[in-house]
Amino acid sequence: MKTIGIIVPCYNEAAVLPMFYKEATAVMDALADRYKTEFIFVDDGSKDETLRRITELAVTDARVKYISFSRNFGKEAAMLAGMEYAVKHDYVCIIDADLQHSPEIIPQMLDYVENEGYDVAASRRADRQGEEKFKSFLSGSFYKVINRISETKISDSAQDFRVMKRDVVKAILSMPEHNRFSKGIFSWVGFNVKWISHENRERAAGETKWSLKGLLKYAIDGILGFTFAPLKLPFLFSGLLFVLSFIELLYGVIKNIAVEGYAPSLPLTLAAVFFTGCLLLLCVGILGEYLARTYTEAVNRPKYIIAKTNTNTTYFTLEGE
Ligand code: UDP
Ligand code: MG
């Protein structure tokens, strides 16, 4: 019998957890003759009753494992912790707790990886219905930009909801970066992916954790983590300014000869100085962003800290300990 680990990142999901558990267990119970299931709820430093709900479930259901972080480390860290634990399984599934990802598709995903020769079966949203227009527009533009400038292709509609073979999870875990942008990571490791269209369901309860600021940070992380294209801007700007200054020089010299008493206008000169200053600061800022990321990689802090768990993973033990 094959085993599957279902990873559920949870941040303040107390309201929806019982519903999720009911739906997900119903789906997996129907497959009980073929797959041995383990649920790995990763409590990402929730401030509500999430952890209590999970521990209650764990008391009555031995399939329920939990890993609870010491604070909120973000969904990327939660998925990572889940995968580090669940890599022992033949298959690993990642699914949101809020029922926007329908557990009913898991059997179909399992069928693709087990019988159809795929390594991953991932959900792709069929539409962006129920999402704010502005948010759709922003994310649409982000994916257009990143796909133009990055070699790692990132699909606009790809979701984290997926079933993966163990080898794929191993490949993902072999990527040691701290700034984890899962969409890029999933795409970067490659493998044979079956995309399954999935209607975007309404959140069953609770509320989204994404603020506009959070999304913007996510977008910047994606760009900086998967392309060096912004570092080419200084070259572009220097070329542009060189051409402009050359034209200006020619114009000044000719006018000086032709017009008696000619003096260049001060406001125009100032504008040129400020413009150049802006471009320079922008370039320094971009450099700084990459440098800061190099710094986080260099200090090599743990990617999360486990405060409580019923798994055999104890804290972030160093290898071999
Ligand atoms: N999540 C998490 N840590 C966070 C934010 C979110 O573990 O810091 C979880 C959340 O509990 C949910 C999933 O990630 O299971 C997706 O979050 P959400 O539904 O807020 O995102 P959306 O579906 O609106 O993109
Ligand atoms: Mg959601």
Image (cartoon, rainbow, N blue to C red):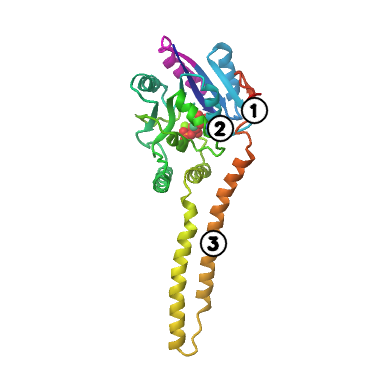
Location of residue 276 in the rendering, given as x and y in whole percent from the top left corner: 52, 66
Q: Which mark is residue 318?
A: 1
Which residue matches tag 2?
77
Task: Specify start and end residues of the magenta stretch as a single range.
Answer: 17-37
Alpha carbons under labels 2 and 3: distance apart:
35 Å
> Dot 3, how many residues are within 10 Å of its Cα: few (below 14), some (14-19), or many (20+)?
some
Which residue matches tag 3?
280
Q: Residue furthest bottom?
A: 260
Mark 1 or 3, which is nearer the eye?
1
- Residue located at (36% from left, 19% from top): 111
- Residue located at (54% from left, 30% from top): 80
Residue 189 as seen in the image, left or right of residue 117: right
Q: Three-letter amino acid code at disc 1?
A: Leu
- Residue located at (57% from left, 45% from top): 293
Location of residue 289 in the rendering, given as x and y in whole percent from the top left corner: 56, 49
Looking at the rendered image, the quarter that the N terminus falls into is top left
Question: Between 132 and 260, which is closer to the camera in this rendering?
Answer: 260
Q: Is residue 29 magenta?
A: yes
Marked residue nearer the N-terminal end (1 or 2) = 2
Does residue 298 appear anywhere in the picture?
yes
Label 2 secondary element = helix
Q: Are marks 1 and 2 in contact (CB under 8 Å)?
A: no
